[in-house]
Amino acid sequence: MTALLVNILLPLILAPLLPGIINRTKAVMAGRKGQPLFQLYYDLWKLLRKGAVYSRTTSWVFRAGPMVALAAVLTALVIVPLGGSSAPLHFAGDLILLAYLMGLARFFIVLAALDTGSAFEGMGASREVTFAALAEPAFLLGLAALAKLTGSLSLTDILGGLTWQIWSFGAPELAMVAAAVLIVFLTENSRIPVDDPNTHLELTMIHEVMVLDHSGPDFAFILYGSAMKMWILGAILVQIVLPGTGAVSPAHLGVSLAGMIGLAVLVGMVESVMARLRMVRVPQLLLTACAFSVLAIILVLRRS
């Protein structure tokens, strides 16, 4: 029951709060009042009460895309532990399933974008899969380094096995993995410096341009799925940077939730002090993340 509450109910309720914290941080740093903290909740409620509009050029793929993507992300949610507790679904090799589920969600959003026949959405889909092809190896190699360091192939055991004692002798490897996961976090969630979620210029958009034709409940599913993906990747990053003691405790859960809030504030600060990178520079950033993960694996292997 505790695992169900911590790993499923809390993310389902709190995940839409993360974009609100990011936007409020940006507003405070810019000296503006900004959007309400719970703006995404209001938007989801409004979209769910509206009807969806479909082009005559689209097929069932366009309608299935948001639903399949949300289902894949929600399935991935039950694999990721939080606060030192065990994930509701955990087994040896579940980290591979996590990567495949995240890829499945992206695949169907891209298919839905291509199904519209729009040149703009096709351009955004092309950029999405290009950057994903570089982000996924960095993510998987980073998890592989953690698996070798902790001696486990289950995400629950990997994140639960990370303690301050491991940080004391494996700080270089863990720091490089954390840096790689942070870059992947910004890329997968279409945040600066990879993409600007607030831009209205189609020629510079990546994720937002893929969902231009979605409306009503379909768009709500996409927004909620994006918030859940931010929570999943953020939870992994926070538990790498803020490990526990190896035991489940309310204090560990509180630290993890505080870390999630701190991560959202950090993203808001990053977006306030720097601009989006030029499109040709983004692959270099992702290759840097891959290099961090590879170096982490090499250092772990040298220790063993």
Image: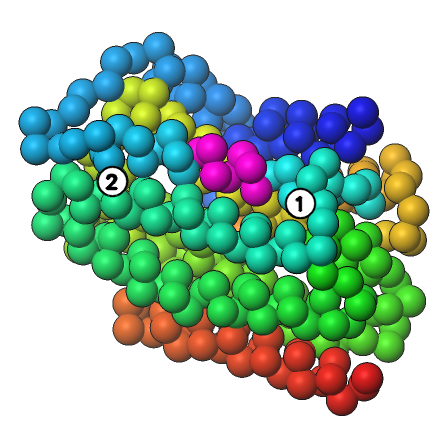
The secondary structure that dominates the magenta segment is helix
47 lies above or below 161: above
User: Relative to 73, is 105 on the left or the right?
Assistant: left
Residue at the image point whose x is 89% and y is 41% from the top:
248
Residue 201, image x, y percentages: 20, 49
193 lies above or below 289: above
> In this rendering, does residue 221 appear at all?
yes
| Residue 129 belongs to the span the image colors magenta | no
Quarter of the image with the C terminus is bottom right
Residue 147, image x, y percentages: 72, 66
Label at residue 80 = 1
Residue at far left of view: 56
Callout 1, which amino acid?
A: Val
Which residue is at the front of the view, 291 or 267? 291
The Cα–Cα distance between marks 2 and 1, rounded to whole angstroms, is: 27 Å
User: Relative to 18, is 166 on the left or the right?
Assistant: right
Q: Secondary structure at mark 1?
A: loop
Mark with earlier residue (2, 1): 1
Which residue is at the front of the view, 281 or 98? 98
Callout 2, which amino acid?
A: Ala
Residue at far bottom of view: 302
Q: Which residue is mark 2?
A: 112
Residue at the image point whose x is 35% and y is 33% from the top:
66
Residue 219, image x, y percentages: 32, 28
Quarter of the image with the N terminus is top right
Residue 211, image x, y percentages: 26, 38
Magenta span covers which residues? 70-76
